[in-house]
Image (tube, rainbow, N blue to C red):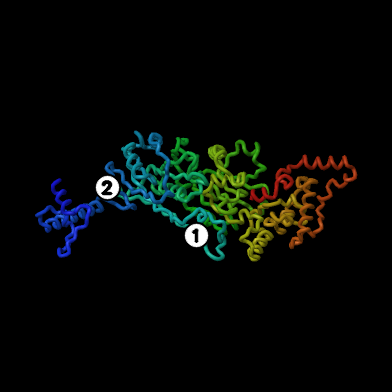
Amino acid sequence: MTSWINSLSKRGYIGSYHYEKDAKYRPFSALLPEGSNPKMLYVKLVLLILMCGSFVSLLNSPSIHHDDEHLTQSSAGVPRVSYEPDDTRYVSDVTVDWPKISKAMQLVAGAEHGGGGARVALLNFDDDEVQQWSTVLPRTAAAVARLERAGSNVTWEHLYPEWIDEEELYHAPTCPDLPEPAVDADGDGEEVAVFDVVAVKLPCRRGGSWSKDVARLHLQLAAARLAATRGRGGAAAHVLVVSASRCFPIPNLFRCRDEVAPRDGDVWLYRPDADALRRDLALPVGSCRLAMPFSALAEPHVAPAAPAAPPRREAYATILHSEELYACGALYDRVVFLDADLLVQRPMAPLFAMPEVSATANHGTLFNSGVMVVEPCGCTLRLLMDHIADIDSYNGGDQGYLNEVFSWWHRLPSHANYMKHFWEGDSGERLAAARRAVLAAEPAVALAVHFVGMKPWFCFRDYDCNWNSPQLRQFASDEAHARWWRAHDAMPAALQGFCLLDERQKALLRWDAAEARAANFSDGHWRVPIADPRRNICATAAGDGEAAAACVEREIKNRRVEGNRVTTSYAKLIDNF
């Protein structure tokens, strides 16, 4: 070999280009030993190319290789699915704790000896984890569930738009498509019909709002659908969730009361109620559509109950009922929570047919917590308490916190919680007039009116004082203001005394009116003479300084003023909305 290389070097074939003008150029001729037949080289090259092509074809044949959308059979008998590393939305970086997985599998009913004999659907586990599953739990019959990814253009804002055409005046609202899961045939070519366990591994975004993640929601809905449709004997399959401990599963889809055992590290194990799961899966994927028809508020909208179902325990609750009298010992299956700044006009009974958490839209992707359908449970309370320190509320209050915990909420018609708010989208006079008509309608069409902004009991009754503040004019409505005062006048006189104004609030109302006059606000409410009799309370003591001071002190002492504009800035009122 050395002599051959030396001869090539001497002839100038290494490090130079050899060309003879009168000779026909033959590729690779320089590589031939002197005196060899060039034709034999071409024959060998052709044979080599054919052999390589045959080998590549064999590797890509259906019997050996499947594409990314299909399953292959592993040596351990567990179907595999090629992972999709390019779609990072679905990638979970949590390390699977196999001892805890094994422990959870031992809790599955009817699956003894480490989950032996259990049929398991694996969703969003990568190839290595699928193989590890078969090694750690060799007695399980595991199959990989396929899930086509949601479109990359689907965002949380698409699932939870700020506004939809509830009454379908122009078009019926639609939701983005989230593909449903599928399970390919097992090693024997038979489709896996039932499962004992559906195991899903979830991503957990770092920073931001991890709960408002399209891929995470999609995976949980897919796991729930497999559990609801592939369980044995009409029951739901167990659901085993693997997720970073700080990123808990959707609490109103996988309910804590359905936990087989408390969370163990990054592993949750549920045995969901099949009927409840199917009911939840029948709901829209987000607030992109109404969860109950708009017409349902006109008449009771009651879901049919099973004949043998126990009597339902339902109740209304307001923040006035949040202390020891109602909070201790009262057990309810469902509660319709009503904020204190609501005026209920019609029965709220239709809302009891809705699941947790059902509410009306607020702004952006958020719901308003003024009217909520909830299903109270001690373990849900513990969940809320456990995460107060690590979940931020956008407004520092209950509404912001609940929106982070219950990010998968269900949209009620706006008439269930009709907010006295004229947002930017209502800038057109036609839309604003339509909202005023709802607020003024007799008989009432909205179940409840929500008095956001400055409350009517903090204003003089002559007009809505929100008109006099540039920041609060978006909450001004003479129609809603007049409606509240009609309700006030119907109350017993003893209760009306709780709606008196303290002296500081009166001074601030006069100040705002003076500012509106100076700015010459076009609505002209600042011109209206104040005739509210509350303006003269304590006036009889005006000539006696000591009596007047005692009167003012008594007013303030006997009333809560923390929610008043006296101690709450306009910016805070807007933030709380």
Residue 439 falls left or right of residue 70: right
Q: Report x, y in % for residue 407.
A: 53, 48
Q: Residue at x 77, y 40 (%)?
A: 558
Rendering quarter of residue 378: top right
Q: Report x, y in % for residue 392.
A: 57, 43
Helix, strand or loop for disc 1: loop
Separation of residues labelled 2 and 1 (CA atoms) = 40 Å
For label 1, the crowd category at 10 Å Cα-Cα, with few meaning under 14, some 14 to 19 and many 20 or more, is some
Which disc number belongs to residue 174?
1
Q: Is residue 377 above or below residue 458?
A: above
120 or 575, which is in the foreground?
575
Which disc number belongs to residue 483?
none
Q: Residue furthest front?
A: 10
Q: Residue furthest right?
A: 543
Rendering quarter of residue 293: bottom right
Q: Residue at x 42, y 54 (%)?
A: 179
Task: Read off the residue under disc 2.
Answer: 188
For label 2, the crowd category at 10 Å Cα-Cα, with few meaning under 14, some 14 to 19 and many 20 or more, is few
Helix, strand or loop for disc 2: loop
**How many numbered marks are there?**
2
Specify which label sits upstream in the sequence, 2 or 1: 1
237 or 463, which is in the foreground?
463
Q: Report x, y in % for residue 543.
A: 90, 45
Rendering quarter of residue 237: top left
Q: Is residue 10 above or below residue 428?
A: above
For marks 2 and 1, give the one nearer the viewer: 1
Q: Report x, y in % for residue 168.
A: 55, 63
Q: At label 2, which amino acid type do we have? A: Asp
Q: At label 1, which amino acid type do we have? A: Thr
Residue 317 falls left or right of residue 276: right
431 or 204, which is in the foreground?
204
Q: Residue at x 47, y 35 (%)?
A: 262
